[in-house]
Amino acid sequence: MTTEALLRDLRRELHDGGLRGCLLVRDLHTGEELGIDPETPLPAASLVKVPLALATAERIRRGELDGGTVLDVEPGRITTPGPTGLSRFRHPARIAIDDLLYLSTCVSDGTAADALFDVTPPARVAAVLQELGLRGMTVRHGMRELSDTPVERFDTDQAHLAHALAIDAGTSGRGHRVPQLDTTRANTGSARAWVELLQALWTPSAIHPEVAGRVRDLMAHNMLRHRLAPDFSSDATTWSSKTGTLLNLRHEIGVVEHSDGRAFAVAVLTESLVPAAVQPGAEALMAACARRLHDHLRQL
């Protein structure tokens, strides 16, 4: 199959499956890549926890922070489905910055991430990205804003109404009546921007090797492996990643490293057009499309 025919097929499959998708797969050694709408910015959701981890680890390296510093963290007390870790705690906890990094990145704990944002605010994270030459991502707010969406205002059996609002209330300029989905107000990034970040973490770049290695290790221990991992994990590969989920958004970025030494960065950002909270078919479809892009690129 030609590259053009493959991209047409994938666009059709995504459309038929009720998804708008922005995908990019890049060979980290040759720079060759294949993608679908990779320049389109979308709200980052929990993907922002990777830049947060990078900025925190860099500040620890510089001596601005001590990873052993223990912070008092208020419980999230969130009861709606989805949040993990401290976000569901009922009582205060004392946790070191190093361990908050693990919870934020590997367990996607929003309350742990906010504790890190308290010591490295969004503007400081954005500044570190700029210092390291990483463009195309915006970091404007912490995670608390992501737990105050229409989903939290409807009963569980009415979650479809929140998703219908997320689908229908956008504008052609990617503004949105739901502020967390408005690209002029939310944390954002395009598939290309996330792949550039992965490239900088996995190959020599302005990121210090110690910092890059630490973030790679955190992503390798990501516990949320229901989305792209089934299509990229095997005894002959290592899959390191981070997911992002918010209302009708389902994202994942990661790097697959093969036993033959080849490595590919993968970014899949999607918006569902189906007003439902649970969509295992969408998870499987986005993974299958990413895998087909990867396999075609690897064969080239």
Image (spheres, rainbow, N blue to C red):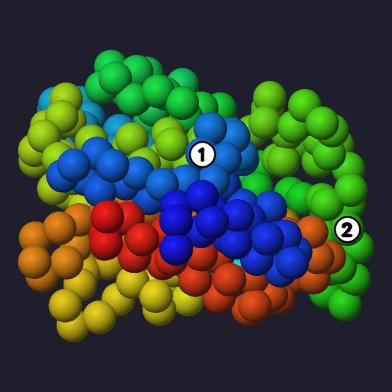
Residue 300: image quadrant is bottom left
Based on the displayed image, in which of its 4 quarters is residue 173 positioned? top right
**Residue 265 placement (x, y as % from top left):** 31, 51
* 77 lies above or below 183: below
Closest to the camera, between mark 1 and mark 2, is 1
Q: Tell me the CA gap for discs 1 and 2.
A: 25 Å
Residue 181 on image: x %, y %: 72, 41
Residue 200 versus residue 125 in the image, above or below: below
Q: Can you say which quadrant of the picture contains the N terminus?
A: bottom left
The residue located at (16%, 25%) in the rendering is 206
At which x and y percent is residue 99?
Answer: 27, 57
- In the image, residue 160 sits, relative to residue 191, either above or below, namely below
Residue identifier under label 1 = 38
Residue assigned mark 2: 164
Give the camera-side residue of 17 and 176.
Answer: 17
Three-letter amino acid code of the residue under disc 1: Pro
Query: How many residues crowd around disc 2 within 10 Å: few (fewer than 14), some, or many (20 or more)?
Result: some
* Extreme residue in the bottom direction: 235
Element type at marker 1? loop
Q: Amino acid at mark 2?
A: Ala
| Residue name at image x 91 percent, y 63 percent | 161
Residue 132 in the figure: left or right of residue 40: left
The x, y position of residue 8, in whole percent, is 60, 55
